[in-house]
Image: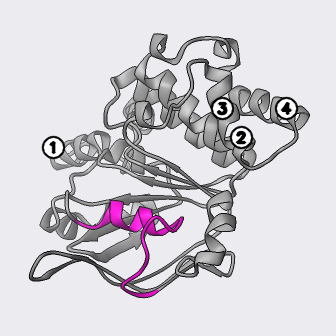
Amino acid sequence: MIKISNLTHAYKQADHAIVALDDISLDIHEGEFIVFVGRNGSGKSTLAKHLNGLLTPTKGTVEVDGMGTHLEENLWKVRQRVGMIFQNPDNQIVATIVEEDVAFGPENLGIPQGEIRERVDDALKSVHMLEYARFEPHLLSGGQKQRVAIAGVLAMKPKYLILDEPTSMLDPRGKREVLETIRKLNSEQGVTVVLITHSMDEAIYADRVVAMDCGSIVLDAPPREFFDETKLLKEIGINLPPAALLSRELKKESYDLKKALSIEELAGTLCSLN
C-alpha cells in the first residue's frame, strides 16, 4: 500500500514559506479507487506529486510498498510502481505515432523488444485504442489522447495509477470515455486508482472520497456517507452531485425517494414511484 504519515509540504518563497500540506496521514490500499476533491489551493495536486516522489516531504514520510520516497535510491522502483497522469495529455505524448508513444516508457525501462510489443498491444486494448495504434496523436480527440497517455503509463505495468484532473480539459464525451476506462482498469485489472477531480459526478464511483481544505484532510468516507455531510461540504466549497441535489430537492417536495447519487439511480427511483 501507499502509506502517508504526518506529511507536511511547504513551498519556499523569497522571505517566507507557504504550507500546502499540513500533517496529513492516510493509507491507500492495493486495489482501492480513491477520489480526492477540494477547491483550488486545497493541496490535492501537491499530495499527488508526493505519491511517486516528484516532491520530497518537508516533514513526515510517504512510503510505497515500504519504500520511502524521500530516499533517492528508492525513486526508480517507486516510479515503476506509481504511474502519473496529468491534466493535459499533450504534455505526456512524446512520439509521432500512437504505438511508439506507448512503447516509450517500457523502452526506457530496458524491457526486451518482444515483451514491449506485447505490453503496447495489451495497454492499447485496455483503453480501447488498439485500432488507433498507427495513428498520429494530433489527429485524435482530447479523450482519445488522454487514453493514449494512460496506455503509455499502463505499458510500464504500475500497481498504482495517480490521475490529476485528467478530464478537466475534455468535452463531455471525452470525460465519459476516460472515466469508463479508469473504472474498468480498477474493477477488471485491479489497478489501484487515485483520482483528483473537481467533478462530483466522478467521485460517486469511488470506494472512498477524501475532501481536502487548506492543506488538511477534512473528510474521508464512502460516497454515500460522504455526500450526506452536506453542511461540512458546503463550508469547504464542495457541491453535491447533480442527481443527489435533485433527489434532495424532490424529497423537500414530499416525494418519497431514496437518496440517489447518479442519474441512473435517480431514474430508477423515479420509475418505481406509483
Q: Which residues are magenta?
A: 42-60
- Image disc number at residue 118: 4
Q: Secondary structure at mark 2?
A: loop
The answer to whether 155 appears left or right of 252 in the picture is right
Q: Amino acid at mark 4?
A: Glu
Whichever of labels 2 and 3 marks the residue nearer the N terminus, that label is 3
Whichever of labels 2 and 1 marks the residue nearer the N terminus, that label is 2
Q: Quadrant of the N terminus?
A: bottom right
- Image disc number at residue 253: 1
Q: Distance from label 2 to label 3 (Cα)?
A: 7 Å
Q: Which residue is mark 2?
A: 155
Whichever of labels 4 and 1 marks the residue nearer the N terminus, that label is 4
Q: Nearer the viewer, mark 2 or mark 1?
A: 2
- Image disc number at residue 135: none
Q: Secondary structure at mark 3?
A: helix
Q: Distance from label 3 to label 4 (Cα)?
A: 11 Å
The answer to whether 135 appears left or right of 12 in the picture is right
Q: Nearer the viewer, mark 4 or mark 1?
A: 4
Q: Distance from label 1 to label 3 (Cα)?
A: 52 Å
Answer whether labels 3 and 4 touch (C-beta < 8 Å): no
Estimate how packed mark 4 is, as few (under 14), some (14 to 19) or many (20 or more) residues with alpha carbons within 10 Å.
few
Q: Which residue is mark 3?
A: 102
- Residue 59 belongs to magenta span: yes
Where is residue 80? Give x, y as percent. 68, 58
Q: Secondary structure at mark 4?
A: helix
Q: Distance from label 2 to label 4 (Cα)?
A: 9 Å
Q: Amino acid at mark 1?
A: Glu
Q: Which residue is at a point 33% across and 76% down the rendered structure image?
A: 217
Where is residue 68? Give x, y as percent. 59, 81
Q: Is residue 1 visible?
A: no
